[in-house]
Image (cartoon, helix red, strand yellow):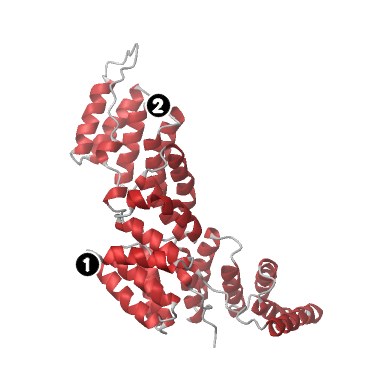
Amino acid sequence: MMSPPPPVLRVVLTAALLLSSRVLAGQSDPRDPDELFAKGVALHQAGDTIGAIQYYETVLEVQPGRVDALSNLGAAFVKLGRYDDAISRYRAALAEMPDHAGVRFNLALAFYKADRIAEAMPEFEGVLEQEAKHPGANLLLADCLLRMGETQRVVDLLGPLEADLGEDRLFAFLLGTALIEIDEVDRGQALIDELFREGESAEGHVLMALQYFRQGNSLKALDELEKAVALNPELPTVHALYARALRENRDHAGAAREYLEELRRNPNHFESNLWMGLLRREENRLDEAMEYLKRAARMRPGNASVVYAMGRVHVAADRLPEARETFEQLVEVAPRFKQGHVLLATVYYRLGERGLGDQQRAIVEQLRAEEKEEQREGDEDIGPTSFGDASSPPESE
């Protein structure tokens, strides 16, 4: 699971507990909903979450649709990790008050904490439509975008906010990471310098590691990431980056360990799922490999790296019809990926489809001729590209 957001992003209980002085006109129920609500708030603030839930639910029996009770009940369920229950209460509150930015932010945060990133993003965007400089919504949306590999959107979102959020370390980390990803190294370096101004920080070491990755120096990146993990093992993506550095230094066992650490904090981290699938395939743990790859495919349907890896798992398991279907999908989404055509031809030949195999072989020869003519190499390197990773997945020996 992802670590809790830094203080600027935490839902402040007193902000979530929306005190209300409304009294239901003509209330015939002998229970006083305002008194019940006040008791729930007192218990909530005292840390008795279960007791608070009981009072909020009683309030809602008397006043169904009461927004402050629904919102506080959602906050209480978040506290217990009951995210589905929280989401349903926040949605009910928004049905009553669609323009309430605070409730929408709490709904987005519940999705975020539940690792339902695709659902969190439009809710954060909805908050920003009402409050363009909302710090929590901006930073959490940027984190969602970064995790989805949309680095240019991170720059577009956070770049104009530097005057307002420039001293926030998470802001510097998110924007700096995105800037380095899109090769705006000078601006990224300025944020690195800012992070190191008050001494060592995990964020600063991560950004230095990204610089070293860009230079092709994975050994120095490994050193920086070891320091980052020691300083803050809960920093988002730090274990995935550490895994990449270990992998590029041929420590595949260490890389698997760190990818699993990232997935323990964030089960929907795309790169970690993809590489765990690739590494488990290398270990011939094919069922495990496919489960990781299926999860990656749910996050990025049609991604060429994932389709390629799934096809290779099918080949390793001698599931040739499934391999055929997968590689046919691959060459459709990535028609210039030569290795996809090579493996599809191999599968056709093994299935006795010689004519189809010859067609794929001819495509391979044409791609080779075009590569030679254009003096362009490297089309075979399909692999995860987040964080500047241009290396190909590990190949079978």
Q: Classify residue 360 as left or right of residue 144.
A: right
Amino acid type, residue under disc 1 in the picture: Gly
Q: Quick one: label 2, few (<14), some, or many (20+) residues within 10 Å?
A: some
Residue 199 is labelled as: 1
Farthest left residue?
Answer: 46
The answer to whether residue 373 is above or below residue 228 is below
Q: Which image quadrant: the N terminus? A: bottom left
Q: Secondary structure at mark 2?
A: loop
Q: Residue 19: image x %, image y %?
A: 27, 28
Q: Secondary structure at mark 1?
A: loop
Q: Classify residue 264 as left or right of residue 39.
A: right
Alpha carbons under labels 2 and 1: distance apart: 50 Å
The residue positioned 41% from the left and 67% from the top of the image is 186
* Quarter of image, res 96: top left
Q: Residue 106: image x %, image y %?
A: 37, 41
Residue 65 is labelled as: 2
The residue positioned 34% from the left and 11% from the top of the image is 26
Q: Nearer the viewer, residue 256 or 142?
A: 142
Q: Classify residue 208 as left or right of residue 7.
A: right
